[in-house]
């Protein structure tokens, strides 16, 4: 039954990062004057770290941020969600910057786009599972 609540199955860190790498968009959560702010951004997973190019990069750099992405089928209420929490740092190396600029187009066209790498401290992932399916 579509309306029946789903069961959460915890994902491993490697599986969470693999799933995150399969979708192009997510949300970065950071603080502005001690209040939470959330902005949709495009991302890539690079060596187990999340890299984004965004106009809010200057506000995120040096701070603890969360990054969340998911792929959920609204009709069947199945899918997954992954959250990465860690410190965001600017990517400054010119060679690395050029590589990310070639692979990662910012979601928003704006001044002041920065390339930010999130160093994951906590990675949590959950799959929404039909409760009739065990395992």
Image: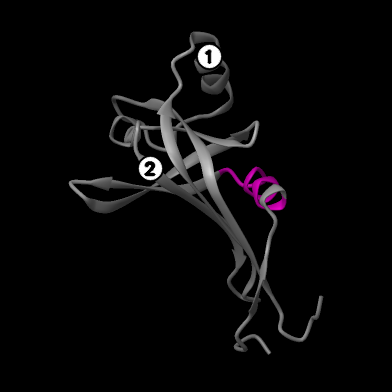
Specify which label sits upstream in the sequence, 1 or 2: 2
The residues colored magenta run 15-24
Looking at the rendered image, the disc whose residue lies closer to the viewer, 1 or 2, is 2
Q: Looking at the image, which is closer to me, 34 or 27?
A: 34
Lateral position of residue 52 relative to residue 8, left or right: left
Which quadrant of the view contains residue 5? bottom right
Q: In this view, does 6 lie above or below 27?
A: below
Q: Looking at the image, which is closer to me, 116 or 100?
A: 116
Identify the image quadrant of the C terminus: bottom right
Q: Label 2: which residue?
A: 64
Residue beneath the point at 71% across and 47% down = 14
Question: Helix or strand or loop: what does disc 1 sit on?
Answer: helix
Lateral position of residue 35 relative to residue 113, left or right: left
Q: Main secondary structure of the magenta part?
A: helix
Q: Label 1: which residue?
A: 98
Q: How crowded is mark 2: few (under 14 residues within 10 Å), some or many (20 or more)?
A: some
Work out which residue is located at the far front of the displayed protein and give it: 121
Where does the image place residue 27, in percent across and percent down from the top left? 44, 49
Where does the image place residue 43, in percent across and percent down from the top left? 53, 38
Where does the image place residue 3, in percent across and percent down from the top left? 60, 88
Q: Is residue 6 above or below residue 22?
A: below
Q: In this view, does 25 lie above or below 93?
A: below
Residue beneath the point at 64% across and 85% down = 2
Residue beneath the point at 18% across and 46% down = 33
């Amino acid at each position: 039954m579509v309306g029946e609540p789903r069961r959460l199955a915890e994902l491993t860190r490697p599986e969470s990062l693999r799933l995150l790498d399969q979708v192009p968009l997510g949300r970065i959560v950071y603080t502005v004057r001690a209040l939470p702010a959330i902005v949709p951004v495009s991302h890539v997973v690079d060596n187990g770290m999340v890299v984004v190019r965004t106009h809010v990069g200057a506000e995120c750099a040096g701070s603890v941020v969360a990054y969340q992405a998911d792929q959920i089928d609204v009709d069947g209420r199945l899918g997954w969600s992954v959250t990465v929490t860690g410190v965001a740092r600017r990517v400054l190396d010119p060679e690395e910057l050029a590589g990310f600029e070639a692979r990662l187009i910012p979601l928003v066209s704006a001044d002041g786009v920065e390339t930010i790498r999130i160093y994951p401290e906590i990675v949590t992932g959950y799959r929404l599972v039909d409760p009739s399916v065990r395992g």
